[in-house]
Image (cartoon, rainbow, N blue to C red):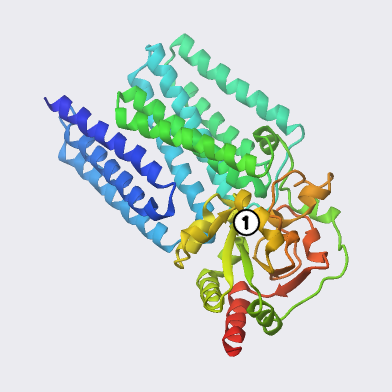
């Protein structure tokens, strides 16, 4: 009876994961979906503790609930305080912790299953994948955080990494084949997996880190699924499969958005930053525009499209952009937002940011839907976006972003680009758009200049 109740709760928890994931696909239901899935996880954790077989000392219960309390407080405070621009870094840290947990499960359970080939295979697979995910996620976090500024590529790094990967498989297979319970071999495999995770991510440029994080996220899910298989825990298995499959799909979506195969992301040189930047020099003169002149231009427009980017998130200008939208619409101007799939460096980043300022979800247009509208647009206001509006992706075969789908902002009657400076974007190359005849540059911090623009618009009443 007790086992039946446990399985029923696990089944219900698994259903909440699936429904919650489905609800996350829409901004209007995402919050409730997150709460539903979190509720299912809480129920699964409590069930695992309550229905545990065997004697458990009060000290162990104290350690379990103490760890849960500490983890809850740290996670809650971290999530509440993190800035939207730091969200990819937070995802990387949380993912790394998941990988570390999977690796620790392997280290703890290995000695209890020596001689059982199937269990040893599952344990070592989860430990290796979790270790790679943990160390790789930490390097990804360091790159996004600026601790590691450039890609670090050892001589023949692709060959070196491939040999290490083959060695990991061979070493793990040998341990299972021989049935050895030696701690030396276990920890040697663990250390080698950690080292591979570091070497796997180090050569990849910063511009590709979001794709790598998503890929590592799928690794963590796979490692968790192995843990669920080991313990016969259905909810752990379901959760791991969902995380693994979602991470894989997200990785492929991001690669498609950049029109680059995953193989090229992992083994290519895109996003190296300084090297690419040095190859590209000024392409001409730029025209500047001030808030007062732009206010007049917007005031007499009929259709305006706003293109938000990473710079908008850095400046925390989402509330000002909403105020700008409100003022323009009160004057009969049609305002919509063009969202590139990887705007802000993560899918959905801009959607969440603009949702904070109560921008209606229906106003957010995906790239495929909005591109035909640019030709009928009076003014496009690009706020902090760079590579996703660079025409070089369509015109310059030598460009590292060539072939990447972009927003066709150059087709509008006028294009205003807000940036702090002429510094290249994440891909480290100049943007042809800035030098076009129809383009004007609005230099300065997005929040500051947009606030000035709103003030100028109000003065036109």
- From the viewer's perspective, is 340 left or right of 59? right
Q: Secondary structure at mark 1?
A: loop
- From the viewer's perspective, is 247 left or right of 64? right
Depth check: give the residue in front, 445 or 164: 445
The residue labelled by disc 1 is 146
Q: Quadrant of the N terminus?
A: top left
Residue 14 in sight in this render = yes
Depth check: give the residue in front, 268 or 15: 15
Number of numbered discs on residues: 1
Q: Residue at x 61, y 83 (%)?
A: 452
> In x, y percent, where is residue 125?
47, 24
The 10 Å Cα crowd at callout 1, few under 14, some 14 to 19, many 20 or more, is few
Picture quadrant of residue 281: bottom right
Q: Residue at x 62, y 81 (%)?
A: 453
- From the viewer's perspective, is 435 left or right of 87? right
Question: Looking at the picture, does residue 301 appear above or below residue 458?
Answer: above
Depth check: give the residue in front, 310 or 157: 310
Q: Residue furthest right?
A: 284
């Amino acid at each position: 009876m007790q086992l039946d109740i446990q399985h029923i709760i696990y089944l219900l928890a698994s259903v909440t994961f699936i429904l919650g994931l489905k609800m996350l696909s829409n901004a209007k239901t995402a919050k409730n979906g997150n709460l539903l899935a979190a509720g299912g996880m809480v129920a699964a954790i409590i069930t695992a503790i309550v229905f545990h077989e065997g004697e458990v000392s009060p000290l162990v219960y104290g350690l379990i609930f103490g760890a849960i309390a500490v983890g809850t407080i740290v996670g809650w405070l971290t999530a509440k305080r993190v800035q939207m621009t730091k969200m990819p870094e937070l995802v990387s840290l949380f993912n790394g912790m998941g990988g570390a947990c999977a690796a620790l499960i392997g280290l703890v359970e290995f000695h209890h299953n020596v001689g059982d080939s199937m269990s040893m295979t599952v344990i070592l697979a989860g430990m290796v994948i979790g270790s790679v995910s943990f160390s790789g996620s930490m390097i990804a976090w360091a790159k996004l955080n600026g601790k590691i500024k450039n890609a670090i590529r050892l001589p023949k790094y692709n060959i070196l990494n491939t040999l290490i990967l083959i060695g990991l498989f061979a070493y793990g297979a040998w341990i299972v084949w021989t049935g050895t319970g030696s701690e030396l071999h276990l920890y040697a495999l663990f250390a080698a997996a950690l080292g591979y995770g570091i070497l796997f991510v180090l050569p990849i440029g910063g511009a590709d880190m979001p794709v790598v994080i998503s890929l590592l996220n799928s690794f963590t899910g796979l490692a968790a699924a192995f843990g669920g298989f080991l313990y016969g825990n259905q909810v752990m298995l379901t959760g791991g499969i969902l995380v693994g499959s979602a991470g894989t799909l997200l990785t492929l979506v991001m690669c498609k958005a950049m029109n680059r195969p995953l193989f090229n992301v992992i083994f290519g040189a895109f996003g190296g930053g300084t090297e690419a930047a040095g190859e590209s020099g000024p392409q001409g003169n730029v025209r500047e525009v001030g808030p007062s002149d732009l206010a007049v231009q917007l005031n007499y427009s009929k259709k305006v499209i706003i293109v938000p980017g990473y710079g908008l998130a850095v400046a925390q200008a989402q509330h000002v952009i909403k105020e700008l939208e409100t003022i323009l619409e009160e004057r009969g101007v049609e305002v919509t937002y063009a969202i590139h799939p990887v705007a802000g460096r993560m899918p959905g980043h801009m959607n969440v940011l603009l949702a904070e300022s109560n921008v209606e979800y229906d106003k957010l247009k995906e790239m495929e839907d909005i591109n035909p509208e640019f030709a009928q647009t009076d003014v496009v206001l690009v706020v902090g976006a760079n590579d996703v509006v660079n025409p070089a992706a369509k015109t310059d075969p030598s460009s590292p972003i060539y072939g990447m789908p972009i927003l066709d902002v150059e087709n509008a009657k006028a294009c205003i680009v807000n940036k702090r400076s002429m510094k290249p974007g994440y891909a480290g190359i100049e943007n042809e758009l800035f030098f076009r005849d129809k383009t004007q540059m609005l230099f300065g911090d997005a929040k500051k200049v947009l606030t000035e623009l709103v003030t100028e618009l109000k003065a036109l009443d």
